[in-house]
Image (spheres, helix red, strand yellow):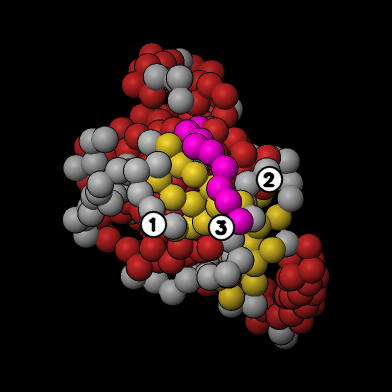
Amino acid sequence: MKIYIKKDEGESGPFSKEELRDKTYSGEVDRSAMARQEDSSEWKRLDVLLRQAESPGKASPSVNVPLEQLFDPKEKKALFWLHIAAIPVWLFLLALTVVTFGGLLVAMGIVWLFMAFGEAWFAAYLKTNAVRVTEKQLPELYQAVETSCRKLEMASPDVYVIQHNVWNAFAAKIFRRKVIVLFSGAIDSILLKGDMQQLTWVVGHELGHHWAGHFKLSQKLAKMGGFWLIWLDLWHSRRRELTCDRVGLFCSSSLHSSQLAMANMTVGAQLASKMDAEAAASQWLLHRNEFFVRYRTFYSSYPHLLARMDHLNLAGEEFGIRR
């Protein structure tokens, strides 16, 4: 499909989808520019036409999966044992509070004040150095967030984009406000050769932390009390990330796009589309039982990248998402 771009009193083109992707990435063409297909006289926003070109004639298929099924099968089991591990710690702290006539509560109050100051400091940094995603500010990304939130039946968090040349994003809760921060390194890398559907997987992954209740007080207390059993705490952290991968897959409704986003994180933008996801998952299965692989897994708070590729395939089968 060839596309013309409206320019001053005339038009320029025609351009292929790939050419326009490069031009929008470089800033030569704005994604909000008016454009039309070669065989049509109807002018639309360029970003709309590009989305139609990525999925010609049809929208992403709906995925009929009960939301409860999005949890990694072992996350709740890990959280249960983390709660059990936390009980003796909190009983000890309760006894210590009684013995010190509430002195421990004063100390904890001071720690809380320092933490609150840190949250306020970070919130001020975000408000003045990052761009908040709204209906008019980065509308494509806003639409990806809103669509994903509707699927997850949750309220939309505050989403920010900040310049940081690291492939990363994170979710946080600041003074009870749900926040997602996307680093430009991840966004740029995906959009260099990919599309918004791949970026939706990243958005869905971070939304997953809020949807799954990873910032609830009960989980915080479990992690604070169960930290002494480090292997259990790390196991729970890994299962939480796998839950979020599953949520990202659900939001993107595409196993292929989810795999491409993961491949982008693994080998970079230039090679992601050429990477064989099945072979990468097989590589994990080949080495997962080796001693040092297992040893390193026990001390990792995140699942290994190739393990996540394998889990995406399993989740795709479970959800009925095979493309």
Please tell me which of labels 3 and 1 falls first in the chain: 3
Residue topped by disc 1: 42
Label 1 Cα crowd, 10 Å radius (few <14 / some 14-19 / many 20+):
few
Q: Amino acid at mark 3?
A: Ser
Residue topped by disc 3: 32
Q: Label 2's element?
A: loop
Magenta part, dominant SS: strand
| Circle 1 or circle 2, nearest the eye | 1
Please tell me which of labels 2 and 3 falls first in the chain: 2
**In the drawing, what numbered circle is on residue 27?**
2
Give me the C-alpha separation between circle 2 and circle 3.
Answer: 11 Å
Question: Are the residues at dot 2 and dot 3 in contact (C-beta closer than 8 Å)?
Answer: no
* Nearer to me, 165 or 109: 165
Q: Label 3's element?
A: loop
Stretch in magenta: 9-18
Q: Amino acid at mark 2?
A: Gly
